[in-house]
Amino acid sequence: MKTLKRLTTGLLLAAMAITGNPTFAATTGELLQQGLYAEEVEGNIDSAIKTYDQVVKDGSAPPNHVAQALYREGMCYMKIKDEAAARVVLEQLVT
């Protein structure tokens, strides 16, 4: 029984090594959550801005996700006192 278990485990590990670990792209909803976590919990404003920007640039993102990302990105720029960048982003949101 132990031999069968070891053989099965070995085969599974070999298959994983051969095929690699597939990576899945995060949905825009997941990206919004990641950005909010970076912004509010970690205090990493630069990372949050980059994450929100990914949502904005994703052509398949739903309009409400893009709007949320633009708003959060604008607020991040306000937090770091970059009013010019905030204005550009928030003007995108208005249009």
Image (cartoon, rainbow, N blue to C red):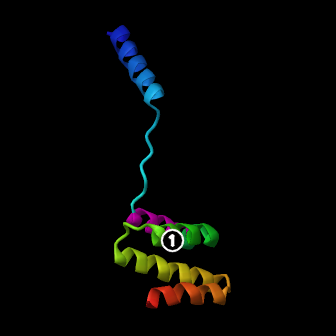
In the drawing, does residue 43 fall left or right of residue 70?
right
Q: Quadrant of residue 94?
A: bottom left
The x and y percentages for residue 25 are 43, 53
The x and y percentages for residue 18 are 46, 25
Q: Which residue is mark 1?
A: 52
Q: Residues within 10 Å of mark 1 (few under 14, many from 20)?
A: many
Residue appearing at x 42%, y 49% in the figure: 24
The x and y percentages for residue 85 are 63, 84
> Which quadrant of the figure contains the C terminus?
bottom left
Residue 63 lies, with reference to residue 15, above or below; the image says below
Circle 1: element type: helix
Residue 10 lies, with reference to residue 87, above or below; the image says above
Query: Foreground residue, 36 or 16?
Result: 16
Residue appearing at x 53%, y 66% in the figure: 51
Residue segment shown in magenta: 28-38
Residue appearing at x 46%, y 76% in the figure: 69
Residue appearing at x 39%, y 18% in the figure: 11
> Which quadrant of the figure contains the N terminus?
top left
In the drawing, does residue 92 fall left or right of residue 9?
right
